[in-house]
Structures are given as C-alpha cells and as structure tokens.
Image (cartoon, rainbow, N blue to C red):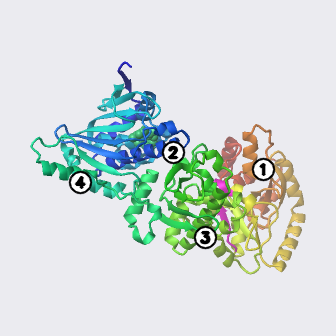
C-alpha cells in the first residue's frame, strides 16, 4: 500500500498536547498501559483461537517481550496477540473509541485549563486512551503489527505533530510491537533493573511471561557474560499468578490495587476489595472491587458492563453483564470458574444455569459486604453518595433481595440536617408511637422539600418525613410498598392525618366546622380557579402557611406523566387540590373580601402555593402587577 498520512481527530491532538505538556510525575505508568494492551491482545487471540484453530496455527507460546536498544534509545513492547491490520491501526490508534470521545472532551472542558494537566492521568485512564501515555516518555512511536488470520504487516507511526502515517511493514510472526523513541531525558527506561522494577510493581499478575532483552549487546562482550545474560533474559520479570487464586493473606493491598487499575483503567485505588470463593453448587473464585467514584458510563444505557470471566485461567470476556444484576453495575472484578466449558460464547452465557448461580452468589456477597459496611457510617456514606442512586434500582428489579436492599437505602429527612441521610430502620425507630406509616415527600430539590408547607403538620406532631429528591425515588415509590410492616405514604397526596386517633377525630370535626363556615368562600375559590385546580378544601397538613397544593389520592405519578408524554401520548394536565389553612389570618381576611379584590387575592393565594413548593407561577406578569398593587395599598 502507499504510505498515507492522516490527521488525528481533534480530540486526540488536544489530548496529546496535554500528555506532552503535563508535568505528570508518574510517567512510568506508560509501561503498564502498553503491557496491559499486549496482555489484552493475547487474551483475545487465545479466546478467538478456541473456535478458530487456524488463528493459532503457529502454535504460539504466548508472551510479552520488552526489547531495548540503548544506542538507538528505543524501547519496544512486543506481543504475539491478535495483531491489527491497517484499518484497525487507523481505527484503534487514530481515534478515541467514539463512545469515549464526547465524554472525554466534556470532562476535559469541565476540568478547565488549570485543572486539566493535574487530572490528565485520571482522564487518560478513564476513557481508555492508555496507548497515548507512550508519548509521555517518547517523542516518536512506531507500531508494527501483523494480524492473526492475515498475511501482511503494517506500521503506524507518529511524532505527535497532529498526524500519523500508515504504511506497509515487515514483521516476523503475528502480533504487535510498539516501539518508543525515548526522549533524551527518559533514558532510565532503557535500564533492565528499572524495567524489572516497574513490571513487578504494576504488572506482576499479568498471566503471560514478560521478558527483557537487550538488542545492542556490547561487541566486546565476553562469552561467559553473554551466556549469563542470555540465561538471565529467559527468566520472566513477573510471577504470573492469577491474583484471584491466591489466598487473601498472601496478597498485599498494593497488588490488589494494581490489578484493579489494570482491570478498570481507573487511576485511583479501589474503594473496597472483595476476594471470595463460591463452594457447593458451583465452584468459582472471584475478586470483586467497588470503585471510589461513579463514572458517567453508569448512566449510559448502551454501555456494556459486568465482570470479567475466566474459565480455568483462560480469559473468556470482559463486561459479562450476566454475572451482575444491573443495579450492581458499578462493581468491577473477575470471576473464574471451572464449572463452565471452555468454548462458551456470550450468547450461551445468557441462559446458563451455572452463570445464574454465580450471579446470585456474587449478588449475595456484595449485599453482605455492604451490610457490614453500614457499621462504619462515614465509609458507608461515601459509598452511598457515589452509588446510592444505582443501588435503589434494585428494590424495583430484584424482588428476591428487595427487603435486603431496602435496608441499605438512605434518605435525607425533614428533621435531619441538610447533607445527612438516614436508614429506614432508624426512621422507623424514631417514629412517635401513634405514627402508623412511613411518610415521604417528593420534590426535585432538597432545599425546596425542606421548606414545603406540606411538612408543617407532620412537624407539629413530631413525625419525620423522608425527602425523595433523587429522580429515581419517584419510580421507587411504586415498588417500595412497605418496610418493617409499615406502608409508605406520600404526605402531599390524598388525605393524611397525624397524631392519635382522638386527635385526628377532633381535627376532622374542627375541619368540618371550618369548611361549613368557609363554604361560600371555598365555592368562590373553586369557581375562580376552575381551570387550574380539581378541588378546594380545608387542610389537615398546615400550621404556618395559608395554603398548599396536593395531588389527588389516585393521581398518576409525575414520572409516569412525563414518560407517557415522551411516548407522544396526550396526557392532560393533572389537576391538583388547593388546601387552605382555615386558622390562618390571611385566609380569614381574604374570605371576607368581595368582587375584584376577592379574585385578585385568590389568584395570589394560588401563586403563593406554587412558589412555596418551588414551582413557577403560571402568569408572572399578572402576579407582579397584583403584588405591586398590594404594596402600593399597604
Ligand atoms: P484501550 O486499551 O483502553 O482500549 P488504548 O488507547 O490503549 O485504549 O488502545 C486502543 C485500542 O488499540 C485497543 O482497544 C486495542 O484494540 C488496540 N490495541 C492497542 N494495543 C494493542 C496491541 N498490543 N495489540 C492489539 N491491539 C492493540
């Protein structure tokens, strides 16, 4: 083929600039990234050759070599994995995986100029652009690759000048070699001892031997020195033991952390490491991790996620979603089972009984880990802040474990401090003896919820109210049903009563009496607001505010309305009930007005109810006019 020059996609240039200009102290991680890619390529080659024997017709001894030429100042990472053809070189090394591209740019922007350099390593890892880390230590990179199943080799080369070239090349055998022309100040990576140290530190668990070889041996090397060197170079730099097979007590936390980073491309240590094995029905070993932070991909529906699966040490695939329920999709890790056939395919995993058993064991283990974590309030809060939103989905989708999951939920409440959250069991413990139900209030923002007039009577009676302010909470109300035998009740919907039975009875009588007295006024309000509210009545919820809006007992939840509208259904505006506080001086005063003053005052009462719950008023101009009239009169 003709040698051709291509421009990098803009975001790569942007990123390369940052890579080169960032003063990142841990440039050494470039080696881990390249070894990790090499190991992935061998994993894939091994897996593909299970079904297509011709791909491994050369009967390869799977390995990764690090070849150094001190004179030429080059370091090469070479593997005999899948290899890439010209199109793949272009696709894989000329663009960032398109799903990642947008997210990467966005994150880059959000970090801003100042933060960008400092956070770059984290970003590189997060968006799977590990290969480009090579440019932290090299000013020119050449990749020579020959794809298994193909017959020609190609090379990709770039000096980061905004473009790269693709051309024909020569390569003995299949696989990929990534050659780095090290910058003058990066000569340390030519040193065998230094390379050995890095492999031990970051890549010890890689399942294939990683060896070192010096290419420009001294011309005057003595025979015995040569022999000794060659013997020495045969020994792998890594121990290659699958970490999940080793007993927990024999593994250092740093080793787990490095493995986690290799697996996830996360730049940070894991939040929690969970090694365990399944015995009995299915035999398997698992090594699971909880990350520290949620990534955006958690909320991208197309994104694959799950655990990596090995069968007897052979890599089958990553992101096997059948191994995890969707609400635990933030969990990372590896499962290795000897109870599955080697030639399983993703499709077969779908309804495999062994996989289903592993999934339920994995689920139970994670839930029990979280249950024990509850004892450490600070740690649990950290976890909850990152993944609480995702866990909540479990109540809805996993009926088997719903009761366990409910015990993991935390909510802000009307009586607790802003920023703190409460477990349901603690809420129930604090309920006054006459409170039968668990109260909640839906709102878009916690600040609005805390100020909602609907909370007033609950407060007066010493009842706390859960504040459901996360968008998933609203869906959840349909599956929460009850906890500890107590129903969940929306305090801004239908009828609610607080206090003892006698108190409620007395209140009802007082209300009926007030309603009778206010009847003409209530009728006037109904007429005036006919188009906006479904009913007007005296409230049991209010103590300090003059009025509030509540939903009809059988109203469709707002989320359902939004969903149906999104599906192009014509859903009429659901009318709500305007509740009046009969004891409030303003209500008493307005009830005595007549004519235009009465209609204006009613309009303002309604707007006040909207504003109190954080909703916009329907006619801003009219509201402002009424308000200024009122102020002028005062
Ligand atoms: P990531 O490995 O996170 O996908 P990289 O930028 O490191 O991101 O690599 C991009 C892609 O290039 C990889 O997904 C892989 O398809 C391909 N690739 C990189 N190194 C190799 C290699 N040694 N052998 C085969 N393919 C490779």
Whether 201 is among the magenta residues is no
Q: Earlier in the sequence, mark 4 or mark 1?
A: 4
- Element under disc 1: helix
Seen in the image, is 302 located left or right of residue 188?
A: right
- Vertical arrangement, residue 83 with respect to residue 381, above or below: above
Seen in the image, is 293 located left or right of residue 468?
A: left
Per the model, the C-alpha gap separating discs 2 and 4 is 31 Å
User: Disc 3 marks which residue?
Assistant: 422
- Element under disc 4: helix
**Disc nearest the viewer among 4 and 1:** 4
Residue drawn at (44%, 57%) of the image: 260
Q: Earlier in the sequence, mark 1 or mark 3?
A: 3
- Element under disc 3: strand
Q: Quadrant of residue 508?
A: bottom right
Residue drawn at (32%, 30%) of the image: 157
Per the model, the C-alpha gap separating discs 2 and 1 is 81 Å
Per the model, the C-alpha gap separating discs 2 and 3 is 47 Å
User: Disc 2 marks which residue?
Assistant: 47
Residue 634 x, y percent position in the rendering: 66, 55
Mark 3: few/some/many CA within 10 Å (<14, 14-19, 20+) = some
Per the model, the C-alpha gap separating discs 3 and 4 is 60 Å
Residue drawn at (46%, 52%) of the image: 264
The numbered disc on residue 232 is 4
User: Disc 1 marks which residue?
Assistant: 597
Residue interval drawn in magenta: 463-473
Q: Quadrant of residue 592?
A: bottom right
């Amino acid at each position: 083929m003709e040698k051709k020059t291509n421009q990098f996609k803009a975001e790569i240039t942007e990123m390369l600039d940052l890579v080169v200009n960032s003063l990142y102290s841990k440039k050494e991680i470039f080696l881990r990234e390249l070894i990790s890619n090499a190991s992935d390529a061998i994993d894939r080659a091994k897996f593909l050759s299970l079904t297509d024997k011709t791909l491994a017709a050369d009967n390869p001894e799977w390995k990764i070599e690090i070849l150094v030429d001190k004179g030429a100042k080059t370091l090469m990472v070479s593997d005999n994995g899948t290899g890439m053809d010209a199109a793949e070189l272009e696709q894989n090394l000329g663009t960032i995986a398109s799903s990642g591209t947008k997210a990467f740019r966005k994150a880059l922007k959000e970090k801003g100029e100042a933060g960008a350099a400092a956070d770059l390593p984290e970003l590189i890892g997060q968006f799977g652009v590990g290969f480009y880390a090579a440019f932290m230590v090299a000013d020119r990179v050449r990749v020579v690759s020959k794809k298994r199943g193909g017959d020609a080799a190609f090379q990709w080369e770039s000096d980061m000048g905004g473009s790269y070239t693709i051309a024909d090349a020569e390569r003995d055998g299949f696989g990929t070699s990534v050659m780095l022309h090290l910058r003058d100040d990066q000569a340390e990576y030519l040193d065998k001892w230094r390379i050995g140290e890095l492999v031990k530190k970051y890549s010890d668990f890689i399942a294939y031997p990683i060896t070192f070889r010096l290419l420009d041996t001294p011309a005057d090397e003595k025979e015995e020195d040569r022999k000794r060197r060659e013997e020495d170079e045969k020994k792998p730099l890594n121990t290659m033991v699958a970490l999940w097979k080793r007993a927990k007590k024999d593994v250092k936390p740093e080793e787990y952390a490095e493995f986690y980073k290799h697996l996830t491309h996360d730049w940070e240590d894991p939040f929690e490491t969970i090694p365990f094995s399944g015995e009995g029905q299915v035999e398997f070993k698992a090594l699971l991790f909880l990350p520290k932070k949620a990534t955006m991909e958690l909320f991208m529906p197309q994104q694959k996620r799950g655990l990596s699966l090995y069968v007897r040490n052979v890599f089958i695939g990553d992101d096997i979603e059948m191994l995890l329920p969707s609400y635990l999709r933030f969990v990372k890790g590896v499962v290795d089972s000897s109870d599955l056939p080697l030639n399983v395919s993703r499709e077969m995993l779908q309804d495999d009984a062994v996989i289903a058993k592993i999934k339920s064991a994995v689920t139970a283990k994670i839930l029990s880990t979280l249950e024990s974590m509850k004892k450490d309030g600070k740690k649990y809060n950290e976890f909850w802040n990152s993944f609480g939103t995702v866990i909540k989905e479990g109540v809805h989708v996993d009926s088997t474990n719903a009761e366990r999951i409910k015990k993991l939920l935390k909510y802000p409440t009307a009586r607790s401090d802003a920023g703190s959250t409460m477990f349901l069991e603690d809420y129930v413990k604090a309920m006054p003896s006459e409170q039968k139900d668990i109260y909640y209030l839906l709102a878009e923002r916690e600040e609005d919820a805390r100020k909602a007039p609907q909370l007033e009577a609950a407060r007066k009676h010493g009842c706390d109210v859960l504040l459901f302010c996360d968008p998933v909470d609203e869906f959840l109300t349909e599956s929460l049903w009850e906890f500890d035998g107590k129903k969940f009740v929306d305090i801004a919907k239908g009828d609610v009563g607080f206090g003892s039975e006698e108190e409620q009875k007395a209140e009802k009588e007082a209300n009926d009496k007030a309603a009778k007295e206010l009847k003409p006024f209530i009728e006037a309000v109904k007429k005036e607001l006919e188009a906006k509210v479904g009913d007007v009545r005296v409230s049991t919820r209010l103590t300090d505010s003059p009025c509030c809006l509540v939903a009809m007992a059988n109203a469709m939840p707002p989320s359902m309305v939004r969903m149906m509208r999104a599906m192009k259904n014509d859903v009429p505006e659901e009318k709500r009930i305007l509740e009046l506080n009969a004891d409030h001086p303003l209500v008493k005063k307005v009830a005595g007005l007549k004519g235009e003053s009465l209609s204006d005052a009613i309009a303002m009462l309604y707007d006040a109810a909207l504003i109190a719950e954080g909703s916009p008023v329907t006619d801003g101009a009219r509201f402002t006019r009424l308000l200024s009239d009122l102020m002028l009169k005062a």
